[in-house]
Amino acid sequence: MTRRLLPSGESALLVECDGLDEVLALHDALAAERRPGVVELVPAARTVLVAVDPAVLPLESLATWLRRIRVEEAPAATASALGEAVIRVVYDGDDLDETAALLGISPEALVARHLAASWRVAFGGFAPGFGYLVSDDWVFDVPRLGAPRARVPAGSVALAGAFAGVYPRQSPGGWRLIGRTDAVLWDAGRPEPALLAPGRRVRFERASG
Amino acid sequence: MTRALVVETPGPLALVEDLGRPGFAHLGVTGSGALDRGAARLANRLVGNPDGAAIVEVLVGGFRARFTGGACWFAVTGAWGAVALDGRDVAPYTAVRAPDGGVLELGPAVRGLRYSLAVRGGVDEPPVLGSRSRDTLAGLGPEPLGPGRVLAIGAEPGASVPLIDQEAAFAPPDGAVTVALRPGPRTDWFTDAAQATLFEAPWRLSEQADRIGARLVGPALARREAGELASEATVPGSVQVAGDGRPTILLADRPVTGGYPVIAIVADSSLDAVAQSRPGQELRFRHA
C-alpha cells in the first residue's frame, strides 16, 4: 500500500491512501496511538488529515510518525471506545420502493439487507453529527436523487453511493430516504456529541410500533 | 448587578467569536473563531484578558452598544474607523474605560472590514463544545447579535490593564494586499501555466466573501487532472479551485471537507490580512 504525505499548511499534513479500507485502517492506527499535540484526525474517502499543535508535535515529527506507523490489515475491533451504536428505524421512507426497484430487489429485501449489515462510521463532514457508514456486507451502489430535496427531516435514514447515513437535523439533501429514527444523532451538550463518530460500529434495528 | 454590554444597533453582522472550536472536525464541526485572530488577540491583551477570551466581531461598522452594571475597559482593533464613546472619538487599538451607561459606537470602517471589540473580562456567553464562537455555517454558538441583545461580561481577569506608552496600531492596508502562499495538497492537479498565473495575476476579492470563504476575481486556473476529487479535509486559508477554474480562499467557517482541489494554502501570517480585505480590493500572491 502506498501512503502519500501532502502539504496542508503550517500545522497539518494530509495523508492520501489507496482507498477507503486503508483510510479506515490508518485512522484506527493513528487513533489507537494518538500522540500529544494532535489536534484533529479527520478521515475522508481517500485521505486522513492530521492537524497538530506544532509547538508540541512539529510537522517533521508528524511526518516521521505518519510514514512509520504500522497499519493492521483488518481494522481492530476495538477501534472505537464507544462500543456499538444501535439505531432503531421505521422503514417507511419516501424513496424506499423506488430505490429497491432501481436495485432490482423488493423493498423487504432492501430493508433486510440494511438490517443485516454490520456498519461502521467511515468519516463525517457534511454537517455536525453526520456519518458516512460503510459495510463489507453492503454490495449496493445507490444513485443519488436527480434533484436534491430542499428539506430532509431530521432522523431520516438514507442511502447514497456505497454509503448509508442518518440526517442529524433538517437540511437539504440528495440521498434516498428509506426510513426514519428517533435517535438523537447530535447534541452538542452531551460528552459524546455525535452518535456516529468515525470508527464506531453501527447496527440498525427495526423499531417496534 | 452584573456588568453587561447591551446591543442597541448591531450593524450588518456582529458575532461573538473567540479563537475557535478545534478538535471536532471529525464530527463535522469546523474550527470557526475570529477571522482576524491577531486582532482578537491584541484586543484581548490590551484589556488584560487571556488571548482566547470571547470578543465581538463587527462587520463594517454601524454598531452601537451600551455598557451597563458598572464601568468597563474595552479595546477596538482590526478594522480602522471612527470609534466613539458617548459621542466623543476615542483612540482605536488602545484600552479605554467606559463609564456605567457609556455608549460605544463603531463608525463605518475606512480600512479593513472587521472590528474586534474586546471587553475586560470577555464576553460571557455559554460555550458550545468549549468555544463561544459563532459558526455561521453550522449555526453553532451564540446567535448573531440583534438589537436589545444583552451580552454578559465575565469576571475581571487577574492581569491588570497593561500600560502601553505607544500606540500598537496596525491598520489594515488600503491598497493592494500581499498574501504569502504555501503549496497545497493538490498543486500538481494544475497546469504549470495555472501555477504561474496564481502568483503573477492581480486578483480582486469578489462580493461573495464571508466567514466561510472569499471568492477571487481573476483568470481561470486550468487543471491538468480532469478527474473528480473525493472530498477531503481542508485547513483555513486553503485556496480551493472550483470546476470553473475560479479560486476561493476557505476561511474559519468553511465546511470540514471540500470536493475541489486546493492549489495553495495562505500562510498563517497572511490569513488575518485576507480576513480584513474588502470586496474589490486587490490581492497579490507571493511564495511564502
Image (tube, rainbow, N blue to C red):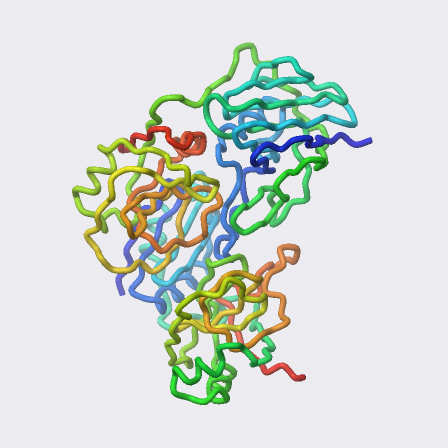
Nearest the eye: A95 or A57: A95
Residue in the image at 51% along x and 57% along y: A127
Relative horizontal placement of residue B217, taking residue B278 as reference (left or right)? left
Which x, y percent locates residue A64? Answer: 33, 50
Residue in the image at 29% along x and 52% along y: B243
Q: Is residue A81 visible?
A: no
Q: Quadrant of residue B133?
A: top right
Residue in the image at 51% along x and 28% along y: B39
For the C terminus of chain B, the image quarter is top left
Nearest the eye: B202 or B91: B202
Q: Is residue A92 visible?
A: yes
Which x, y percent locates residue A141? Answer: 37, 76
Nearest the eye: B159 or A132: A132
Q: Quadrant of residue B204?
A: top left
Image vertical order of residue A103 relative to residue B102, above or below: below
Residue in the image at 66% along x and 38% along y: B146
Q: Quadrant of residue B197?
A: top left
Which x, y percent locates residue B125? Answer: 68, 40
Image vertical order of residue A58 relative to residue A45, above or below: above
